[in-house]
């Protein structure tokens, strides 16, 4: 039996500020860029938009390649982040399609960017938690050094990740 290998892409939806708006502080500008996703956006609708984007960029051939192992595994409307599962051989097509999205239902002029690619769901979830902690610290104006480790400790995954980082850091 052959195992189908996948890649998981962590992406976020950013809302660039309008040229006419002037934020009063750094925290306000961060909150404008990292707004929550609209209530009308669901994982199924997001998947449909990404598949349509793949079809628009790569035609029927690209859509057929991606369709076999494509799935939106996680979507957080509060942080406007999502995780997409794609076949290992074709994840770059999905990456390009996510980057090409310029609108989601209810909002035009958004920027979607992939911030992490991993072979496991655990790797991208760890990064999502780390990014949420760092963003929260920036908005509160705190020093974000150690913020990620505190959040990972709350999730319960800090032990293994720390050992891996220490062994990688000590070898070179």
Image (spheres, rainbow, N blue to C red):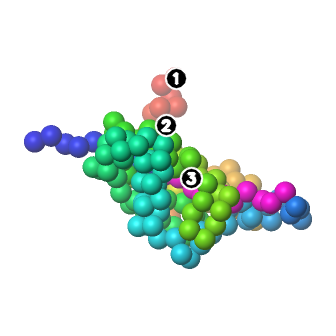
Query: Which residue is located at x 49 percent, y 37 percent?
Result: 166
The front one of 70 and 8 is 70
Residue 48, image x, y percentages: 42, 61
Residue 99 in view of the camera: yes
Gap between marks 3 and 1 measured at Cα: 39 Å
Mark toward the viewer: 3 or 1: 3
Label ID, residue 166: 2
Task: Give the class, few, some or many, for how many residues have Cα within 10 Å of label 1's Cα (few <14, many ≥20).
Answer: few
Residue 49, image x, y percentages: 47, 59
The front one of 47 and 158 is 47
User: Looking at the image, which residue sits at the far left?
Assistant: 1
Query: Which residue is located at x 68 percent, y 58 percent?
Result: 109
Residue 118, image x, y percentages: 42, 43
Q: Which type of secondary structure does the marked residue at label 1 adopt?
A: loop
Label ID, residue 101: 3
Q: Are marks 3 and 1 in contact (CB under 8 Å)?
A: no
Mark toward the viewer: 2 or 3: 3
- The reply to whether the magenta stretch includes residue 58 is no
| 3 or 1: tag closer to the N-terminus | 3
Gap between marks 2 and 1 measured at Cα: 11 Å
The quarter of the image holding the N terminus is: top left
| 2 or 1: tag closer to the N-terminus | 2
The front one of 45 and 58 is 58
Q: Is residue 86 above or below residue 31?
A: above
Magenta residues, as a range? 10-19
Label ID, residue 172: 1
């Amino acid at each position: 039996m052959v195992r189908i290998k996948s890649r998981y892409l962590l992406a976020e939806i950013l809302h660039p500020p309008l040229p006419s708006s002037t934020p009063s502080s750094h925290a306000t500008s961060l909150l404008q860029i990292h707004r929550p996703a609209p209530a009308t956006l669901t994982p199924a609708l997001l998947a449909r938009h990404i598949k349509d984007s793949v079809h628009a960029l790569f035609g029927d051939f690209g859509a057929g390649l991606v369709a076999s192992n494509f799935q939106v595994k996680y979507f957080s409307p509060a942080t406007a982040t999502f995780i997409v599962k794609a076949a290992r051989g074709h994840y770059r097509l999905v990456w390009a399609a996510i980057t090409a999205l310029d609108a989601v239902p209810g909002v035009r002029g958004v920027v979607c960017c992939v911030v992490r690619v991993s072979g496991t769901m655990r790797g991208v979830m760890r990064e999502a938690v780390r990014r949420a902690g760092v963003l929260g610290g920036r908005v509160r104006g705190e020093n974000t050094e150690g913020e990620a480790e505190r959040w990972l400790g709350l999730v319960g995954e800090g032990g293994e990740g720390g050992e891996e980082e220490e062994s990688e850091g000590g070898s070179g």
